[in-house]
Image: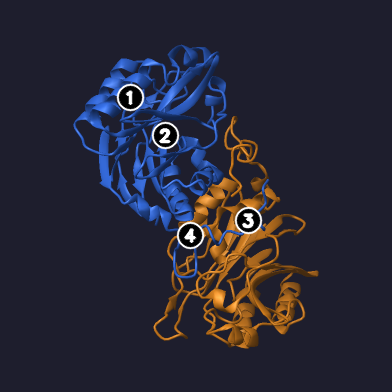
Chain colours: A blue, B orange
Amino acid sequence: MKIGIVQTHPVFGDIDRNLKKITDLISSQSADLYVLPELCTTGYQFKDRKEALALAESIPEGPSTKKILELAQDTQAFLIAGLAERNGEKVYNSAITVGPDGFIGCYRKAHLFGAEKNCFSPGDTPFPVFDLGSTRVGVMICFDWRFPESMRSLALDGADIVAHPSNLVLPDCPQSMITRCLENGVFAITADRVGAEERIPGQTMKFIGQSQIVDPYGKVLARASQDKEEIIIVEIDPQKARNKAINSNNNLFEDRRVDLYRRG
Amino acid sequence: MKIGIVQTHPVFGDIDRNLKKITDLISSQSADLYVLPELCTTGYQFKDRKEALALAESIPEGPSTKKILELAQDTQAFLIAGLAERNGEKVYNSAITVGPDGFIGCYRKAHLFGAEKNCFSPGDTPFPVFDLGSTRVGVMICFDWRFPESMRSLALDGADIVAHPSNLVLPDCPQSMITRCLENGVFAITADRVGAEERIPGQTMKFIGQSQIVDPYGKVLARASQDKEEIIIVEIDPQKARNKAINSNNNLFEDRRVDLYRRG
């Protein structure tokens, strides 16, 4: 199975341009599954909820989802992409999962970061795991990584691969995703963006790139640059994530001591 | 508050020699809290449960605990040390916490690694947090790190510092403890050993050293060598671990979405 990270540099508010760029990047490649960044069609730094509402779209009815569905059909690939989702008067920081046969599902970011809390409503969907036939893919978005329960929930629900659309500004995530894979025995695909936004004077958001793919043993299979748009495709065997044994005596899931853990 | 990691090279089975070495190392120093390695008096690689039973001692009645209690009194310091604990016909891979005023508590390792399962019984104590007056210290042992719920349980129960006696053979722990601190906002003191044991022919256990102290923001305050006995002492303000805010909008504990996490 070939999986790809698509690292882009969205232009804020120019949805058509950003979708065309994604289409151009992916159309020249061949993979079974692509992960795109968080908010990859709109850009990141909304000034307020009103502005987010104006750029957000319904899912799956909106034009961005339709365009990404077309791309999935044209390329016969699964795509996971971060979008601003409008639902009535609410806006969510969401990610859609689509495939050659149509729309599969939507996840709304559970842990909002920084000023996102001024623009988005917190997610109300469970961390989802989608059965894509040859593999099961879980979805979380960016800052969800900081809370180990996010990826743990996905792994316990059977994810082989965790797709992780991101707009990273803090430096810690790429390294910490190695720990997330080591503790859960899954693949992780973090698709980050590059570039900077300063739509609120004095509040520059500089994105760190470094999109990456990590295997269930904590090996970094690919890591992108800090500043360039790029696609990296890696061939993996997702079935490797189903074996949670780390030696003949230890198993990441069977060894868990739920009897001793604090729920909190 | 001054906290110390004590990185030693125990001689298998020579409890008197190992205790003397610990005493010599600590007596020349001045700190408020020292963390010693896992199984620091006996060595690590027991051939079987019978051998472990022969070297294990009651806690707190046994001579090793008594000696460590004396050391705590002499130095007016708190000590956390890994010991093989005998309880009837059972042996646990345990860690004692003692202070100038006496015995405080014992933790029995929850997640046994590799062939430890042939020698020890799995822990039946919750992950403990001890109030030492100026700070609250949680205890976990070595392989417990691999399961995020271990340190999460300690942090949720109020630990400012996680003491982590270890005998590390895999390379991943030092880096992953940075993630553990980032996700929980606590200090971590991993006290590892150095040297190698090959008491079972063909099964060499090479210990990686690299004992370390990490702060609640993921900064490595100290990291020891891979191969030398040493003490490193660092001054910290444990109160910093009580503030779980990471910016004006995010808090490591308040942002948790327990409503969405899978218990598993």
Q: Looking at the picture, does residue B56 appear above or below residue B190?
A: below
| Residue A254 in picture, x, y percent from top left | 54, 60
Q: Is circle 1 on the same chain as circle 2?
A: yes
Question: Label for residue B174?
Answer: 4
Q: Chain of mark 1?
A: A
How crowded is the residue under tag 1: few (<14 C-alpha within 10 Å), some, or many (20+)?
Answer: many
Q: Is residue A40 left or right of residue B100?
A: left
Q: Which quadrant does the N terminus of chain B fall into?
A: bottom right
Does the residue at mark 2 contact the one at mark 3 (Cβ under 8 Å)?
no
Report the residue marked by disc 1. Answer: A69
Helix, strand or loop at label 4? It is: helix
How crowded is the residue under tag 3: few (<14 C-alpha within 10 Å), some, or many (20+)?
Answer: few
Residue depicted at 36% across the width and 42% down the height: A133
Q: Looking at the picture, does residue B84 appear above or below residue B171?
A: below
As measured in the structure, the alpha-carbon distance from the residue carrying label 1 to the one carrying label 4 is 43 Å
Report the residue marked by disc 2. Answer: A166
Of the numbered discs 2 and 3, the one sitting upstream in the chain is 2
Question: Label for residue A258?
Answer: 3
As measured in the structure, the alpha-carbon distance from the residue carrying label 4 to the one carrying label 3 is 25 Å
Of the numbered discs 1 and 2, the one sitting upstream in the chain is 1
Q: Is residue A62 left or right of residue B143?
A: left
Of the numbered discs 3 and 1, the one sitting upstream in the chain is 1
As measured in the structure, the alpha-carbon distance from the residue carrying label 1 to the one carrying label 2 is 20 Å
Residue B89 lies in what quarter of the image? bottom right
